[in-house]
Structures are given as C-alpha cells and as structure tokens.
Amino acid sequence: DAGVTQSPTHLIKTRGQQVTLRCSPKSGHDTVSWYQQALGQGPQFIFQYYEEEERQRGNFPDRFSGHQFPNYSSELNVNALLLGDSALYLCASSFVGPWGEKLFFGSGTQLSVL
Amino acid sequence: AQSVTQPDIHITVSEGASLELRCNYSYGATPYLFWYVQSPGQGLQLLLKYFSGDTLVQGIKGFEAEFKRSQSSFNLRKPSVHWSDAAEYFCAVGARNYGGSQGNLIFGKGTKLSVKP
C-alpha cells in the first residue's frame, strides 16, 4: 500500500512564474491538507480539501490555490512566485473513521524560487 | 493568539541517555496535542497524540508525553535514546472540527536532536 505520494520532489522556478505541485493520498483517504515548511521553521497550514472543495484555509494569499479531483488526489498552485515562496511543501492525507483520524504526510516537494 | 513554542532549537544527548523535549502551547479551547518526527528529506511521522483522558500518552518508538494543563505544556520523553532517534521533532496543536478532521495544525519551530555515540 503506497503512502502519500508527492511530485515532483524538487523544482526550481524563477520569480513571477507559476507552479503546480501534485499529491496522491494514501489509499482510502478522502481528505488532503497542504503545508508550507520554510527552512528552519515548522510547517504552516495552507488549506484542506474534502469532497473536492476547500474546507479550511490558513493565512496565505490568494496566489495559493488548490484543487481536489474525484479520485481524491490534489494539486497546489502558486501564482506570481516570490523568493519567499521557497520552501518544502508537504501534503498530508487522512480519513476520519470511528477510530479517529491520523494524518499521513508525504515526503514533500522542495521548491526553490530564484 | 494560538501558538506553539519549542524553547530548545538544538539538543545533543549521548546514546543511552534520557531525553526530554519541551513544548508549550497557547490555545483558546481544549487543545489536541501532537508530536511529530521528521528525518532529513522525509515527511512528518506521528509519534503520539493527546485528545483526552489519561494525561500520560504512550507513542511509537518508546516515546511518551505528558499533558500538563496548568503549565500549558506537552513535553516529550524517552528513557534511553538510540542513535536512530536523531531527527527533528515538532510539537503541534489543533482542534477537531469540520466533520471530525484535525484540520489546521499549528506547529512549533522544531527541536533538532543529535545523538552522540
């Protein structure tokens, strides 16, 4: 059973460009959350998708947008990239069952903006 | 404001020695508390979590944590550290909402653990 898969693993972009990061959740999971982890910092919540809709959003500008597909996979889009967007982007998937919920994190996409 | 503070940026312990990593939180409601571990180039792995009940929580890899409401703390402990425990450790706080999902987790900045042979 594959865990949470993120692609690509590394990405280099220049300021002003747009980027799309992808996440395939763990099998059976229907909820996907995205986090940004800057160097030397803890992860910061960007947003969460459930049933193809954004359910909750953190304190990130509208340049950050997302999408969830019917197969529960998800994309994170960032427009008009800034140098400060350089970070590790983590995807986490989960499913709320009678036993509770456990987040499974992917290994992340390392984005460098030059 | 909701926040998590991990006062120690970097800790070095000898293999076999005991370990305690500190975590303090500020949260308006009853918090749900978590400890995660991150190895280089890896995602986050859940060590343990506290939702309610017994304030001493057992986790994987021999870790435990104690919730102290009066001190707003959730410190992580391990009686004997192994070299493979070297990693970065993150404390997080959250609330259950939106149909039961943990939703927005607030993480501390992490504590890097080095283990001396």
Image (spheres, coloured by chain):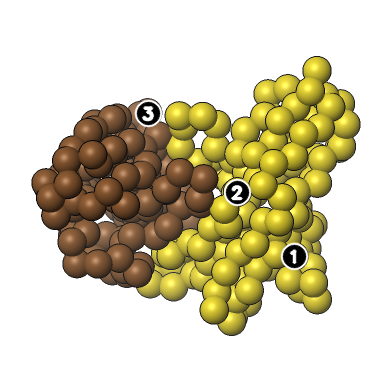
Callout 1: SS: strand
- The span from disc 3 to disc 2 (Cα, nearest Å) is 30 Å
Mark 1 closeness class: few <14, some 14–19, many ≥20 residues within 10 Å: many
Q: Which residue is mark 2?
A: B110
A108 sits to left or right of B42 = left
Amino acid marked by disc 1: Ser
Front-lying residue, B31 or A89: A89
Front-lying residue, A67 or A96: A67
Q: Is residue B6 above or below residue A54?
A: above
Callout 2: SS: loop
Rendered residue at 45%/29% (across/down): B41
Mark 2 closeness class: few <14, some 14–19, many ≥20 residues within 10 Å: many
Residue A71 placed where, x, y %?
18, 46
Rendered residue at 79%/68% (across/down): B68
Q: Which residue is mark 1?
A: B73
The chain holding disc 1 is: B
Q: Quadrant of the C terminus of chain A?
A: top left
Front-lying residue, B3 or B29: B3
The chain holding disc 3 is: A
Q: Which chain is brown?
A: A
Q: Is residue B14 above or below residue A21?
A: above
A7 sits to left or right of B74 = left
Rendered residue at 49%/70% (across/down): B96
- Residue most toward the left? A17
Amino acid marked by disc 2: Gly
Callout 3: SS: loop
